[in-house]
Structure formats: C-alpha cells, structure tokens
Image (cartoon, grey):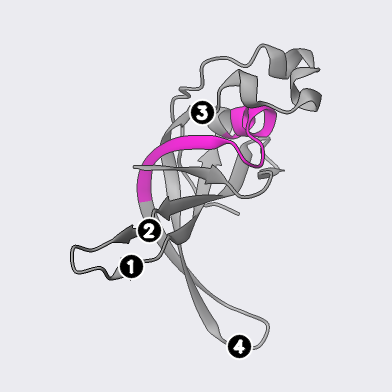
Amino acid sequence: MLIGNVGKDPQVKYLDTGVCVAQLNLATTERGYTLQNGVQVPEHTDWHTCIFWRKQAEYVEKYVHKGDKLYVEGKLQGRDWVDKQGVTRHVVEIMVDNLERLTPKSSQTSSQTATADSASTPAAQVPSENNGYPF
C-alpha cells in the first residue's frame, strides 16, 4: 500500500489483443525530522514503478496526470533483463490491484477541468483485472 505523487504522465500501451496496460512512476516521500539528540534526518523520496491492466489502465490513461496524488495497493513483482551493454538489470514493479485517486477536482489544472471527461471524473476506486506481464 502506497500513497504518493505521480512523477510524469502515465505511459499507456494497447497490446495486439486490445488489452490496455499503463505504467507510471509514483514518488513517496518520508518527511525530514529531528531526533531527540538534535540530529537532523533529511527528507527522502523513493520512486516506485506501478503497472495497471485493463479497466484500471484505461482509467489511468483518461484521468491520471503528472502531480496527481494516488493510493495504490498491489503486489511486488521482480524481473530481470539484459541491457544493450550485456549487463543484467533487475527491477521491482508494483502490480496494482486497487487504485484510488486522491487529488481533489479543485486542484486540477484549468486545461484538465475544461474537458468534459475531466470535469466529470468519477470517484477513483477501480477494481483490478491484473494478470499477465507488464511493458
């Protein structure tokens, strides 16, 4: 379970079968604080790759934008690949089971609220239909 901010607009693909898949990066930040002994611990931000399938991906494509605050639930999935230089890379992604958009309508940009779709954004609890492999 994570609550964070979308780093950039989602990447969306449609597979040959017509299935929609979306990927976005979600930033979670731990605020800085001061320990009792006076030591200051700085703010720290982690980035998470989130994968959405089918109806959730279509929702993400239509309503989720850079800067939006999201609540996501899902499972971690790791995968390896070999890059162009022959180096084995590893990534851990969140296969999202549940999504809730927390950004209030009033904080949307004027260009988003000008469209009929954005002005009527539904409450963002989207059921999961996740199966298969991401991007």
Label ID, residue 101: 3
The reply to whether discs 1 and 4 touch (Cβ–Cβ < 8 Å) is no
Instruction: Please report whichever mark, 3 or 1, sits nearer to the chain's N-terminal start.
Output: 1
Pointer 1 residue: 40
- Considering only order in the chain, which callout, 4 or 1, is on the residue closer to the N terminus? 1
- Residue found 80% across the figure and 17% down from its top: 114
Q: Residues within 10 Å of mark 4 (few under 14, many from 20)?
A: few
Query: What is the three-letter code of the residue carrying label 3?
Result: Arg
The residue pinned by badge 2 equals 32
Residue occupying image coordinates x 78% and y 24%: 110
Q: Secondary structure at mark 4?
A: loop
The mark found on residue 125 in the picture is none
Residue 127 image position (x, y, % from top left) = 44, 25
Using the image as rendered, state which of residue 121 and residue 20 is in the foreground: 121
Q: Earlier in the sequence, mark 1 or mark 2?
A: 2
How crowded pointer 2 is (Cα within 10 Å; few <14, some 14-19, many 20+) is rated as few
The residue at which mark 4 appears reads as 86
Q: Is residue 102 magenta?
A: no
Q: Is residue 2 left or right of residue 58?
A: left
Are dots 3 and 4 in contact, CB under 8 Å? no
